[in-house]
Image (cartoon, helix red, strand yellow):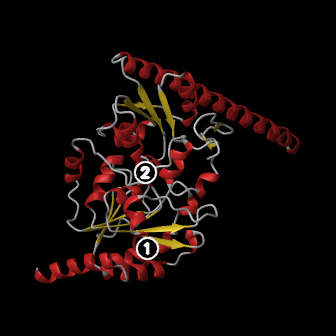
């Protein structure tokens, strides 16, 4: 039996390797099909008005990156006013762009691996590829390799740049941009959020990012929940994909996994205060200029400064910089920072005054 088991283990390993190889090629084929479909769609778009150039902005992910790079649209409109603008993006992020008055069409692909083929096709009069060179595509062993834009801005060096917008515009080979981003929500978004019947005063919270190095431990979040709900008497509304905070407390409302990206943006716009890690919802709070506290640690060994606009203008008040991994930041320091934040104090005191009047 032991001999049979020894023969079976290598067989299982080979079978697993074959399955992974099959998934790898299937993903590459899917990306190639997506690229061809996108090129056809852009050609149809061009054919509707062949006298005008089509400028393509290519940035397929992530939430915060797309929000931060919105000023690129206005840059294109200012420098190429006669051109029409398309943005190539993953389907889940398309609603961030469909209502933007500066975008004429949104083209969707499911993988960054499709972008290089779209650029090389020449279908775009001008391709502004905002991805950094050698960025992983999500397909094992496949990175986004650029021979256009500025390939010197790569998946490592971009952390040395001034901000996400500055790094990505530089990677695209256009001038290094700066400035506050704007958001335009599709019609009906506010109506959907109205139906949620949120408290008139609440703190919006986002607890996790797409990189665990930027996350804060659940034990520290729980201590912060106690301070905000019990000591300050405020409701907390958690947004994001997966819930972290305990939903069994009456003052904690979880909307995790229940909202679209634009509905999440509208909830944050209505918040009296936002607390979160460096993530897409933090960029939403930045756009809306919401009073906020962003927990920001060193990112892959760098003092990363991702934000433009409101958070850059008020970085000392809105950003809590921690010199180590965020996992070593104690809740007591966050609470102490809030107690010395004038906007937080004003928000809490207004609620206490209203309670006394009632």
Give the residue drawn at x 72%, y 37%. Answer: 16
Place residue 91 in its image quadrant: top left
Q: Left of 24 or right of it: where is 227?
A: left
Place residue 300 in its image quadrant: bottom right
- Direction front: furthest residue: 79
For label 1, count other residues whose C-alpha is less than 10 Å away and answer few (under 14), some (14-19) or many (20+): few
State the quadrant of the C terminus. Answer: bottom left
Residue 304 or residue 55, whichever sits in front: 55
State the quadrant of the N terminus. Answer: top right
Earlier sequence position, callout 1 versus callout 2: 2
Place residue 273 in its image quadrant: bottom left
Q: Report the residue marked by disc 2.
A: 68
Q: Position of residue 136 (x, y in %)?
A: 62, 43
For label 2, count other residues whose C-alpha is less than 10 Å away and answer few (under 14), some (14-19) or many (20+): many
Numbered disc 1: secondary structure: helix
Q: Left of 315 or right of it: where is 358?
A: left
Q: Left of 19 or right of it: where is 201?
A: left
Give the residue drawn at x 43%, y 73%. Answer: 316
- Direction left: furthest residue: 358
Real-space CA distance between mark 1 and mark 2, rounded to the nearest whole angstrom: 20 Å
Q: Report the residue marked by disc 1.
A: 316
């Amino acid at each position: 039996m032991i001999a049979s088991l020894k023969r079976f283990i290598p067989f299982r390993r080979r079978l697993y390797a074959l399955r992974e190889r099959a998934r790898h090629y299937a993903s590459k084929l899917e990306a190639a099909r997506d690229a061809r479909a996108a090129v056809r769609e852009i050609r149809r778009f061009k054919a509707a008005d062949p006298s005008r150039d089509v400028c393509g902005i290519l940035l397929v992910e992530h939430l915060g990156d797309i929000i931060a790079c919105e000023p690129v649209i206005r840059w294109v409109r200012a420098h190429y006013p006669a051109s029409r603008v398309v943005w190539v993006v993953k389907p889940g992020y398309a609603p961030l762009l469909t209502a933007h008055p500066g975008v004429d069409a949104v083209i969707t692909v499911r993988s960054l691996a499709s972008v290089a083929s779209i650029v090389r096709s020449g279908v775009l009069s001008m391709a502004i590829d905002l991805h950094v060179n050698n960025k992983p595509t999500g397909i094992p062993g496949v990175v986004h390799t650029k021979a256009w834009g500025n390939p010197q801005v790569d998946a490592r060096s971009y952390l040395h740049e001034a901000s996400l917008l500055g790094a990505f515009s530089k990677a695209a080979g256009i001038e290094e941009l700066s400035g506050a981003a704007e958001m335009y929500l599709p019609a009906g978004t506010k109506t959907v959020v109205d139906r949620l019947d949120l408290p008139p005063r609440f703190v919006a919270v986002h607890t996790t990012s797409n990189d665990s190095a930027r996350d804060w431990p659940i034990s520290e979040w729980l201590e912060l929940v106690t301070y905000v709900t019990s000591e300050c008497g405020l409701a907390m509304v958690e947004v994001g994909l997966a819930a972290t905070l305990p939903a069994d407390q009456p003052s904690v409302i979880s909307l995790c996994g229940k909202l679209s990206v634009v509905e999440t943006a509208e909830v944050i716009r209505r918040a009296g205060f936002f607390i979160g890690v460096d993530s897409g919802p933090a960029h939403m709070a930045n756009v809306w200029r919401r009073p906020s506290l962003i927990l920001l640690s060193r990112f892959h060994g760098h003092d990363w400064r991702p934000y433009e606009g409101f958070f850059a203008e008020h970085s000392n008040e809105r950003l809590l910089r921690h010199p180590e991994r965020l996992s070593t930041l104690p809740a007591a320091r966050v609470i102490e920072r809030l107690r010395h934040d004038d906007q937080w104090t004003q928000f809490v005191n207004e609620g206490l005054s209203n309670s006394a009047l009632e």
